[in-house]
């Protein structure tokens, strides 16, 4: 059997035929070149308008990289025809194996971008003996195709989140669809300003925005403002994940400060290495951690009192009726305000200020658990942290859409992996 036969099985073109296959002598990596020819009497198609046009001349031969095979790089070798198009002028013909002026074939592009979902970009480049740039271009192409072809109908619930990227306080705003039947990253914007989120709504469009029923977000002022203005009809929920994050951050602050104070006063550093004891849910602690926690609880420290306040706040989420949840919230806030622990008081004040939005979670019948946004948040951080060359915003953006966007891929007759 000839290689040509396999090629015809995996990727057959209507108006082109495979010719001879050569092993390239003296190449640094074993390389195969496959000749391509137009089928007899076939007319070239203008790459400008997509119509059959009379031929004009032929450009020099070009190589198009195809999927490597058995440790061999594989190239198509073809001299593109140029057409004399009455609408577009003299243009190169359209070739079904490649898009635009690329050097990588479509098949190879989708092959690489598919692997880039499973491995890091660097690993893909190494595994297939190609360059990081080729992997990047492939993923970029997959993302732009996917975003052009994605179906945005029926989005009823969105979650808005932010992540930090790079060092310092650089943020990205991420908008997810969090409907029960479809969860995916919809949009990314730089920073977390009013302008950022307005950018999302502009992209999403007025009609679709009107159809939104639920929006989950953090208590971040610019977000609250934009949501109210643009999607006032939706139930706006302050979700559990973000609220618990605020409490954890407050505990962290109290603990750090108290550790310093204790050290200065010469006390035994009881709080050192206690961070996770205080931040983890009690049911997730190991036996050893549990013993240490019960020891810690004997001290009347601000960190411990903050920890207990946070644990108590967990009860809030158990309520069913917004009315009783509200009563609980009021009591908890009063108690926390009396604790004289500044970082905790700050959270209590913030919760008080946003009481109606907090209670919306119960009005929405708790259907948006913290798990959805939290899960995306974790994955997004992981993706940006796989730092391989993601120094630029563009690369981070593409990596996130690729990993979390659940983007469609074109239907092909053959699956290459
Ligand atoms: Zn044309």
Image: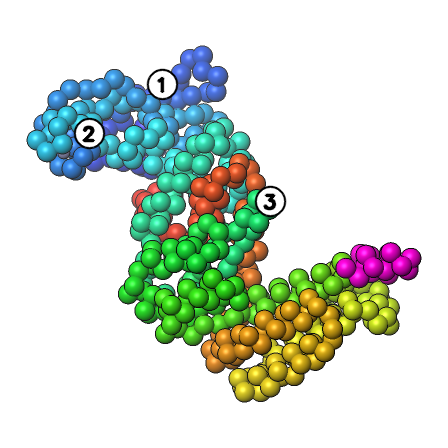
Q: Is residue 54 magenta?
A: no
**From which residue to which does the magenta span run?**
257-274
Q: Residue furthest top?
A: 26
| Label 1 or label 2, whichever comes before in sequence order | 1
Residue 216 vs residue 150, the one in the foreground = 216
Is the residue marked 2 within 8 Å of ligand 1, measured from its CB? no
Is the residue marked 3 within 8 Å of ligand 1, measured from its CB? no
| Label 3 or label 2, whichever comes before in sequence order | 2
Q: Which residue is mark 3?
A: 167
Q: CA distance from mark 3 to mark 2?
A: 47 Å
Label 2's element? loop
Instruction: Let me know if residue 260 appears in the view.
Output: yes
Q: How many marks?
A: 3
Q: Which residue is mark 1?
A: 22
Q: Which residue is mark 2?
A: 93
Q: Measuring 16% from the left and 37% from the top, which residue is drawn there?
A: 49
Q: Measuring 36% from the left and 37% from the top, which residue is drawn there?
A: 107
Give the left or right position of residue 84, taking residue 245 as reference: left
């Amino acid at each position: 059997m000839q290689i040509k036969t396999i090629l015809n099985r995996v990727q057959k073109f209507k108006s082109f035929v495979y010719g001879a296959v050569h092993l390239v002598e003296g190449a640094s990596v074993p390389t195969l070149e496959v000749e391509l020819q137009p089928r007899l009497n076939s007319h070239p198609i203008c790459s400008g308008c997509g119509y059959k046009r009379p031929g004009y001349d032929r450009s020099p031969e070009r190589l198009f990289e195809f999927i490597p095979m058995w440790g061999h790089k594989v190239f198509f070798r073809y001299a593109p025809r140029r057409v004399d198009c009455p609408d577009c002028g003299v243009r190169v013909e359209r070739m079904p194996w490649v898009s635009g002026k690329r050097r990588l074939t479509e098949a190879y592009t989708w092959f690489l971008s598919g692997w880039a979902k499973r491995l890091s970009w660097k690993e893909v480049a190494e595994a297939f003996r190609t360059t990081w740039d080729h992997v990047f271009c492939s993923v970029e192409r997959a993302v732009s195709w996917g975003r052009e072809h994605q179906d945005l109908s029926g989005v009823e619930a969105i979650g808005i989140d932010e992540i930090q990227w790079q060092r310092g306080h650089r943020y990205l705003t991420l908008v997810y669809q969090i409907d029960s039947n479809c969860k995916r990253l919809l949009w990314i914007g730089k920073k977390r300003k009013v302008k950022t989120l307005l950018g999302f709504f502009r992209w999403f469009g007025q009609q679709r925005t009107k159809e939104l029923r639920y929006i989950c977000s953090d208590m971040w002022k610019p977000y609250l403002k934009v949501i109210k203005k643009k999607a006032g009809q939706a139930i706006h929920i302050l979700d559990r994940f973000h609220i618990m994050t605020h409490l954890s951050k407050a505990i962290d602050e109290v603990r750090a400060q108290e550790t310093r104070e204790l050290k200065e006063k010469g006390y035994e550093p009881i709080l050192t290495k206690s961070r996770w004891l205080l931040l983890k849910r009690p049911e997730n602690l190991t036996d050893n951690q549990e013993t240490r926690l019960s020891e810690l609880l004997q001290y009347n420290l601000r960190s411990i009192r903050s920890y207990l306040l946070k644990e108590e706040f967990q009860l809030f989420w158990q309520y069913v009726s917004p009315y009783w949840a509200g009563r609980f919230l009021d009591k908890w806030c009063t108690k926390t305000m009396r604790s004289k622990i500044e970082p905790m008081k700050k959270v209590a004040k913030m919760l008080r200020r946003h009481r109606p939005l907090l209670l919306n979670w119960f009005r929405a019948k708790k259907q948006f658990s913290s798990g959805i946004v939290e899960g995306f948040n974790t994955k997004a951080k992981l993706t940006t942290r796989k730092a391989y060359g993601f120094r630029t915003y563009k690369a981070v953006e593409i990596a996130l859409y690729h990993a979390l966007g659940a983007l469609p891929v074109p239907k092909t007759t053959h699956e290459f992996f």
